Image (spheres, rainbow, N blue to C red):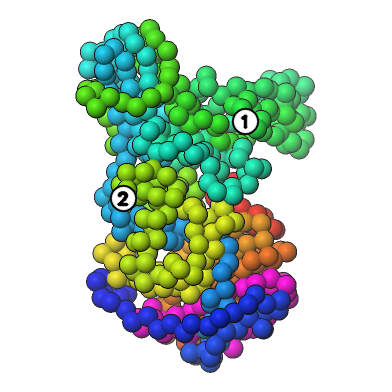
Amino acid sequence: MVTKGRRILIVSAVVALVGAVGPASQVSGAPGDPALTAALDQVFADARLAGATTGVEVRDAATGASLYERAVNQRLIPASNQKVLTSIAALELLGPGHRFHTDVLTHHGDLYLRGTGDPTVLASDLDALATQVARSGVRVVRGDLVADDTWFDDVPLGTDWAWDDEPYSYAAPISALTLAPDTDYDGGAVIVESRPGPAAGARAAITLVPPNHYVRVVNRATTGAPGSANTLSAVRSHGTNTILVTGSVPAGATTAGQDYLSVEDPTAYATSVFRDALARHGVKLRGRVTTGATPADAKIVATDQSMPLSEMLTPFLKLSNNIHAEVLVKTMGRLASGEGSWPAGMRAIDGAVSALGVNTAVIRSVEGSGLSRRDWLTTRQLTTALLAAQTRPWFTTWYAALPIAGQPDRLVGGTLRSRMTGTRAAGNVHAKTGSLTGVNALSGYVTDASGRRLVFAMLVNTSLVSATPILDAAAVTLANAGASTPATARIAPPASAPADDDVECAWVKAC
């Protein structure tokens, strides 16, 4: 491990490249490790990469020397490898101890619920706030309940987010006041749970988590015969908070089905659940529920703090949580320039990673999660960021928060929990994954068989099939490097991964 604070010499060979059609023609520059180059060339000669564009770089973590290069300066869509830059910048600008807070305040008879972007607020946290309000002596709100989400701007979706992703939790709207239904902290989402009715032919039982009166469910699902296929589907109608549930669930099913869907307006959703909590604790609302900014002289009567960023990194990076990434972007913008927007946040991120040696003039980022196809990174700039991260005082925490190959605990292995099992890479590779349709990515760290730590970044674009097994094979090859009898790895796709890897497995709760 590189000593904290030590500066690393980063050796960079700047090579101009044009996207190639065949794997062999994408190699760029003389290799720094002939044996490793031969082994990796064999991996990336896989016919499944024909017609795709592949960027790869492997560097010595101690010296920064480049050991393997393939289209290292080609701009490619990074998918969730974008989160490497976002999380590094957040630790630099906000610090590991940063906490979000949600406050309840009173002013001239009105009650204000004010958020600062906390994506980890649960229904139980809102209930605890309502408890504090009641204990403060507020029993009747004679004015309005005002939701204050002005810490961020009013742009809810990132640039070039796909319209057909909008109903799903991984593409939920971003708000300074939001609510998560679970301890994965999927902010701005609701869980639709389905169970069979009392007998075949009966209506299926549908419940919402958390329980709320904000989302409307139209239940057309039925109970099928015992052992029949589960065909249940829950879809949120575009532009509404109406969820249509259709299909059937087999009679006798003992495990509830779960669909994770976004809500149309996270601010109104959180406020609705908070209003219900106030009522449970005997606080009556006489006025309306509305939105607005909290007056400067309002009095705080209840407050909730999130976990520190150092802890939030685990669900953020292990589970590739898009909402966390975008909340952090807007938070960095707000604290850097007083503007909680994507443009302000991206300017702040560019400044932070530039200070670490990343050349932001040759890449482009428009949001923080990688859900947009207008994010373009290069493997050279990713490895530069990974090398620089080792010198920072927060590195140990960040490194531990990356997914770890072959570790079955989902909050340890994360999106790599079922990958590279039974190999030298298992428990060794710490890396950020990335998957969109036609895009696969893997970037991080591995220690080879000789004890040498390597930094690597691998991006594949326009592949017609999943490149995940090829990237895994490359990572295992790196782990095997330096062994007395090194071997090129061949790895089949993990059984739990979708054949086309259209999304990160954690987004659909498949890992």
Q: Quadrant of residue 438?
A: bottom right
Residue picked out by circle 2: 336
In depth, the one of 403 and 174 nearer the eye is: 174
Is disc 1 surrounded by few (<14), some (14 to 19) or many (20+) residues within 10 Å? few
In depth, the one of 371 and 424 nearer the eye is: 371
In depth, the one of 490 and 117 nearer the eye is: 117
- Residue drawn where x is 39% and y is 10% of the image: 287
> For the residue marked with disc 2, what is the amino acid?
Ala
Question: In screen coordinates, is 361 left or right of 396?
Answer: right
- Residue drawn where x is 48% and y is 90% of the image: 32
> For the residue marked with disc 1, what is the amino acid?
Gly
Residue 261 x/y as whole percent: 58, 36
Picture layout, residue 210 above or below residue 448 = above
In depth, the one of 92 and 360 nearer the eye is: 360
- Residue drawn where x is 60% and y is 40% of the image: 166
Mark 1 or 2, which is nearer the eye?
2
The kind of secondary structure element at disc 2 is helix
Per the rendering, the mark at residue 239 is 1
Picture layout, residue 274 above or below residue 373 = above
Magenta stretch bounds: 38-67
Question: Could you give the CA–CA distance between mark 1 and mark 2, rounded to whole angstroms?
Answer: 32 Å
Residue 151 x/y as whole percent: 36, 37
Residue 203 x/y as whole percent: 71, 20
Tag 2 or tag 1, which sits nearer the N-term? 1
Q: Is residue 64 on the magenta stretch?
A: yes
Q: Quadrant of residue 175?
A: top left
